[in-house]
Image (spheres, rainbow, N blue to C red):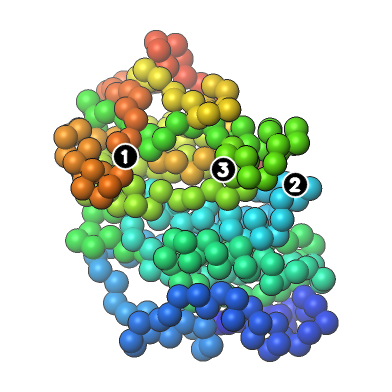
């Protein structure tokens, strides 16, 4: 694995080379193409990107982003990768690779953690091309993802236009409902609990929405009650919502402010083109929930003020 990080402190009794060798076998699930080098050198080497190059970094901390009393280190590795890849989905980008930087206390089962990351990366067809290891008080993973938008035109959150329709990729609140249900004793394979412990990025949908002419887009990691305001702020517009679609087992409050759904919110003016791009890729249609309006202070749900609420870190 591309790393020299364990010089800052061992993460187990094994040597650094032994740890890296074992992890490399776990995460090497996707082969490199000709001319590319993944794990084993000081840095990864990838073939040229097409169009816009899109890069994002996300950190997932055990006990903060995932309840460590309910869910496993494998779940942490899985969620760290998929939540990071969700940022590429929000840009309409095709993922090309990712690197992992793992911090953990001595004795942490690094194999279990990396198995979760490897499973997620494989399911998302995104190779793990390198990473780093060091000691820390609590297990955490920083994931840097990189992708491409062939032809350019990555979808930004600042592109919403007056008159655009607003859509979401699916009903909301499943992850928050899953956490509530898990704490009440629901099994790990409960459909809502899975949305909390094993979220999946809307990569195919993001690519389809970009192809279908989306003007603005972002993921809903912090809840539509906060993230839609962020999109409107960046675009200098307001919005009028007709509905907030609620996922099975969730409440309206969870759908608005629960966060961690990793669904997409987008705006577009040509519904025929948007739906056609989805259908051409065998995807369902996004759910229309409202309209972009000119007055930046006009932000409503069924005519009532739509206040900011959602997940925010206390830094």
Q: Residue at x 35, y 82 (%)?
A: 33
In three-dimensional space, the C-alpha distance between marks 2 and 1, rounded to whole angstroms, equals 32 Å
* Residue in the foreground of this view, choosing between 307 and 150: 150
**SS of the residue at dot 3?**
helix
Circles 1 and 3 in contact, beta carbons < 8 Å: no
In the picture, measured across the screen, residue 55 lies left or right of residue 162, that is right
- Mark yes or no: residue 32 visible: yes
Disc 3 designates what residue? 195
Image coordinates of residue 7 in percent, x first then y, are 72, 83
First reached walking from the N terminus: tag 2 or tag 1: 2
Q: Quadrant of the N terminus?
A: bottom right
Tag 3 or tag 1, which sits nearer the N-term? 3
x then y, percent, for residue 123: 47, 61
Percent of width and height locating residue 287: 34, 30
Which sits in the foreground, 63 or 193? Answer: 193
Residue corresponding to mark 2: 70
In screen coordinates, is 88 left or right of 73? left
């Amino acid at each position: 694995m591309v790393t020299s990080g364990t010089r800052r402190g061992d993460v187990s009794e094994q040597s650094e080379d032994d740890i890296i060798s074992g992890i490399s076998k776990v995460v090497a699930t996707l082969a490199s193409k000709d001319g590319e080098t993944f794990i084993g050198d000081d840095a990864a080497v990838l073939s040229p990107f097409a169009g816009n190059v899109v890069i994002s970094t996300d950190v997932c901390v055990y006990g903060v982003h995932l309840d460590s009393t309910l869910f496993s280190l494998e779940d942490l590795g899985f969620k760290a990768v998929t939540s990071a890849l969700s940022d590429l989905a929000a840009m309409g980008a095709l993922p090309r690779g990712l690197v992992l930087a793992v911090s953990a206390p001595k004795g942490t089962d690094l194999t279990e953690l990396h198995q979760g990351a490897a499973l997620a990366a494989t399911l998302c067809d995104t190779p793990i091309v390198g990473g780093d290891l060091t000691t820390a008080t609590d297990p955490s993973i920083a994931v840097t993802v990189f992708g491409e938008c062939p032809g350019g035109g990555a979808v930004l959150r600042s592109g919403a236009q007056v008159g655009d329709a607003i859509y979401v990729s699916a009903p909301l609140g499943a992850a928050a409902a899953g956490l509530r249900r898990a704490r009440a004793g629901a099994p790990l394979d409960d459909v809502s609990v899975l949305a909390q412990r094993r979220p999946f990025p809307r990569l195919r949908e993001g690519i389809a929405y970009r192809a279908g002419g989306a003007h603005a887009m972002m993921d809903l990691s912090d809840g539509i009650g906060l993230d839609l305001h962020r999109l409107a702020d960046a675009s200098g517009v307001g919005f009028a919502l007709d509905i907030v679609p609620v996922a099975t087992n969730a409440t309206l409050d969870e759908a608005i402010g629960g966060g961690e759904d990793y669904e997409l919110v987008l705006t577009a003016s040509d519904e025929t083109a948007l739906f056609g791009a989805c259908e051409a890729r065998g995807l369902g249609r996004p759910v229309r929930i409202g309209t972009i309006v000119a007055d930046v202070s006009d932000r409503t749900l069924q005519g009532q003020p739509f206040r900011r609420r959602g997940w925010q870190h206390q830094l």
